[in-house]
Image (cartoon, coloured by chain):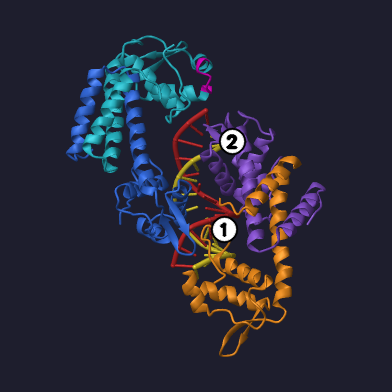
Chain colours: A cyan, B blue, C purple, D orange, E red, F yellow
Amino acid sequence: MFLHIDPADELAIYDQIVRQLKFAIAAGVLRPGELVPSVRETARQLAVNPNTVARAFRELQTEQVLHTVRGTGLAVTEDAPERCRRDRKELIRHRVRGALREACRSRLSVDEIRNMVHSELQRVENGEPD
Amino acid sequence: MFLHIDPADELAIYDQIVRQLKFAIAAGVLRPGELVPSVRETARQLAVNPNTVARAFRELQTEQVLHTVRGTGLAVTEDAPERCRRDRKELIRHRVRGALREACRSRLSVDEIRNMVHSELQRVENGEPD
Amino acid sequence: MFLHIDPADELAIYDQIVRQLKFAIAAGVLRPGELVPSVRETARQLAVNPNTVARAFRELQTEQVLHTVRGTGLAVTEDAPERCRRDRKELIRHRVRGALREACRSRLSVDEIRNMVHSELQRVENGEPD
Amino acid sequence: MFLHIDPADELAIYDQIVRQLKFAIAAGVLRPGELVPSVRETARQLAVNPNTVARAFRELQTEQVLHTVRGTGLAVTEDAPERCRRDRKELIRHRVRGALREACRSRLSVDEIRNMVHSELQRVENGEPD
DNA sequence: GTGGTCTAGACCACC
DNA sequence: GTGGTCTAGACCACG
């Protein structure tokens, strides 16, 4: 299973599911044509409300990342990987930009920002926890 | 006036006020002992409800950044600057960390992350818009 | 239901709610992980405005006594009992100290203070009314 | 000067003045017939708003502790000492009772309350600060 | 004039 | 259903 929910994350649960599924497709873990686990099964494994999973999958259908296969389930679309790779970069870029814009607004000096970014980048590379 | 509300910001209005006031204190624009503009006056200038401003100020009181001077108004506490400078850094660090953690989860390569961060850092330094 | 509002109490309604909830947790009536009654339900039962209850609960969140379970409600945190027991004692101590300090300032003799405290202590033990 | 204002006290300034004046009369520091300092002079010495002092004195007149001496000022009434001694005890008793009632409501055991009261009583006797 | 409390009712996102 | 935010407007005590 490539999904996991972090209840502490400020992101909505359905959004965590959406993103992680996109990331999995972008990374090639899930390939075009493959079926994703059913809403019920996913909800059970993540221990979340089925409505939440359904909402995530609905959103992915609207974005044409998933499509229904009648009587069978939901499958990854042909051009999902391309779409997801594009999205992935934009999502991250948007978040990075937001963080840096706030750093700027707070009047931290550019050097302070640089140092902070570098130290945090190292933490992340090393997989250090909070 | 050092406050302005950005309706497009996803942050709650009261939280925008809280942060900007802290930033102003951290930057020395507002000094210990000074009175902040009254709730009503601030609400008028920002064109928001007085309750919203009151909530922001109340929060700043529980964080001991402001304290009431009875019948007079709200004043900046003696050690607010230190507190605010500390808070500012932690706030930014938390946000940067969140952005980088998501980048990591997205399975972007470290190089891609690095490049993105650097290009965004330059944008911010140059004050380029969205 | 472990909450009740005393309109005669000089304490603000939201503060009565805060304290009673803390006392209930300190006493083990409400245990970690349990959901507290919803804002709307509590407001209905106490016949006060939901905003007032929400304010009380919000305060308990900033004190880390409650935490939100998204879309579900507010739950008692793991270390709330310890926190509440500590708070309870400090709250009472502060109030007792205030009373005795005023007694002292009033230039009542120590013996008079002693006697008064003892007689009041007995009243309270016996549950006598005002 | 027998008056001093504690800005940290939760009691209103005018009430602090009222009580301390009563306490001074109860203790015989101020005697019947004596003039109290003028509103202006008192306000100057305490560094508070003259309105606040005026309110305190007005209240003391209503309670017949002070009375106006035309063209001269405010004087302590004949039976003020008796009145003030009675008031003093009731004020203190009320406050002590309030503290103990809250202690009781908090479900602290009687022994815990006893211990706390005794330790605080000693602190006060020794004039220890907060 | 100031802040503090409370009510009433609306709208939102999330589960 | 849940909590969170915001608006509107009232009332209070204090200085």
- Of the numbered discs in the image, which one, if any, rests on residue A22? none
Q: Residues within 10 Å of mark 1 (few under 14, many from 20)?
A: few
Find residue A26 and report its horizontal and vertical position in percent: 31, 16
The amino acid marked with disc number 1 is: Glu
Q: Is residue C43 above or below residue C105?
A: above
Residue A117 in the image: above or below residue A128: below
- Please tell me which residue lies in front, D98 or A15: D98
Q: Position of residue C7 (x, y in %)?
A: 68, 55
Is residue A28 a member of the stretch shown in magenta?
Answer: no
Query: Looking at the rendering, which quadrant does residue A123 occupy?
Result: top left
Q: Quadrant of the C terminus of chain A?
A: top left
Give the amino acid type for the residue marked by disc 2 in the picture.
Arg
Chain where mark 2 sits? C
Q: Which residues are magenta?
A: A45-50
Is disc 1 on the same chain as disc 2?
A: no
Dot 1 falls on a residue whose secondary structure is loop
Q: Chain of mark 1?
A: D
Q: Percent x, y for residue B34?
A: 37, 58
**Image point (70%, 34%), residue name:** C29
Check the image and report above or below for C12 versus B108.
below
Judge the density around disc 2: few (<14), some (14-19), many (≥20) Cα neighbours within 10 Å.
Answer: some
- Please give the name of the residue rendered at 65% of the width and 64% of the height, measured from the top-left corner: C106
Q: CA distance from mark 2 to mark 1?
A: 24 Å
Looking at the image, do the residues carrying marks 2 and 1 touch, with CB atoms under 8 Å apart? Answer: no
* B63 left or right of D21 in image: left
Q: Which residue is mark 1?
A: D10
Residue drawn 68% across the image and 71% down it: D26
According to the picture, the residue beneath numbered tag 2 turns out to be: C83
Which residue in the rendered view is the most extreme toward the front?
D126
Q: Position of residue B8 (x, y in %)?
A: 33, 43
Is residue A49 covered in magenta? yes
